[in-house]
Amino acid sequence: MKFKPADKIQDLQYFGEFGGVNPSISDSSTYTFLSAKTMFDTFEGNAEGCYLYSRHSSPSNLYLGEALAAMEGTEAANVAASGMGAITPALLQLCQAGDHIVSSRTIYGGTYAFLKNFAPRLNISTSFVDITDLEKVEAAITPDTKVLYCEAVSNPLLEVADIPALSKIAKKHGLQLIVDNTFSPLAISPKELGADIVIHSLTKFINGSSDTVGGVTCASQEFIDSLRSVNDGANMLLGPTMDSFRAASILKNLRTLHIRIKQHSKNALYLAEKFEADGLRTVYPGLKSHPSHELYKSMMNEEYGFGGMLVVDAGSLDKANALMELMQEKNLGYLAVSLGFYKTLFSAPGTSTSSEIPEDEQKEMGLTDGIIRFSIGLDNDIERTYEMMKGCMKELNIL
């Protein structure tokens, strides 16, 4: 049977401590033991169901982790206080001094900055490659390589990773394939396609209300246990702990993710087709002109569409900035970073979310000055939205 991520979330049922339909929030930083031996066993990792200290785990965080593991089809998951709080510990748990990572060159700017600028302090090196060129990916692998890292749909240029092919390369060379699935929750299920570890910034579509930051690492029970180890676990020792109230809030929002993703995708496809027909350079995996359109189709869970992220080239940075300011003035969305909000968000990634990437490398990967990254909202009347956006573009001589 085909994997159905929303069904996996729906089938989870939790009861609050007093019979509530939402699980009770664990408002404690530390937990009591009835015996000293149980405390010792918990420190040793041998006391199932006992809680030690909320930096290690808490009931609220474990509820959310269980739901996200079910969504991604992994044995377990560990939530963190931010997306970067999930990404960096996962990489550091797998790599030590002298190790090497092969990464997509088009990734979130914070991840790029960590791999390019911070990891070398620990003597961990990274080769950045065009993830769509499988020959270049394999050629970059060395005897010291431990991790192959990519985004299912890349930030900000919406390149699509061939996860089954990358999985074969990773297995051939004994590497761990980490896939950041932030742009395509539900639509793509990386674990089912061969990924070892799946990461999300929960801040984005999964939470969906732009009121908190969070992250998750979905993987085998063995890897998640290693992240939480009191002796050498990167999540335990670096301390990117999610607050219990935030975990409870994200778990509630997760229940509507399938509805929201369908509407985000429907609206983004409509706008992409219209903008392309108007003659704008438009990048969206749902367009037949996208170089990886057929690849995405082969990997996707069809009912969720091609996602809510859309890229349009306004021609220059000045025109992009003027358009975003005008659209905000017309109440079409917000000039803001991040994504997955119920209102449309837009930014020029070259000077914002990807500004950590040097200008020459931005040009090499096709990140030109006029590019606007749209996170398309849940607008009820997308035809009206399109006409208003088109009016803004005409007013600024972009169309």
Image (spheres, rainbow, N blue to C red):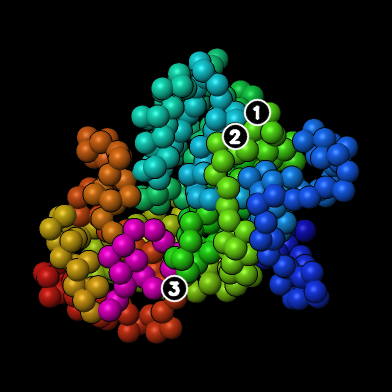
In the displayed structure, would residue 78 be above or below residue 67? above
Name the kind of residue labelled 1 in the image. Answer: Asp
The C terminus lies in which quarter of the figure?
A: bottom left
Bin the neighbour count of mark 3 within 10 Å (Cα to Cα): few under 14, some 14-19, many 20 and up.
some
Q: CA distance from mark 3 to mark 1?
A: 40 Å
Identify the magenta region.
331-345
What residue do we see at 68% from left, 28% from top?
A: 231
Question: Do labels 3 and 2 touch, CB within 8 Å?
Answer: no
Mark whose residue sits in front, 3 or 1: 1
Disc 3 target residue? 342
Which of the two discs, 2 and 1, labels the residue nearer the N terminus? 1
What residue do we see at 39% from left, 73% from top?
A: 343
Q: Nearer the viewer, residue 362 or 112?
A: 112
Report if residue 200 is visible in the image. no
In the displayed structure, would residue 150 be above or below residue 31? above
x, y (%) of residue 153? 47, 50
The prevailing secondary structure element of the residues shown in magenta is loop
Q: CA distance from mark 3 to mark 2?
A: 35 Å
Mark whose residue sits in front, 3 or 2: 2
Residue 355 in the figure: left or right of residue 116: left
Name the kind of residue labelled 3 in the image. Answer: Tyr
What residue do we see at 36% from left, 70% from top?
A: 344
x, y (%) of residue 223? 69, 36
Question: Do labels 2 and 1 touch, CB within 8 Å?
Answer: yes
Disc 3 on helix, strand or loop?
A: loop
Q: Nearer the viewer, residue 117 or 173?
A: 117
Place residue 269 in its image quadrant.
bottom left
Disc 1 target residue? 232
Disc 2 on helix, strand or loop?
A: helix
Disc 2 target residue? 237
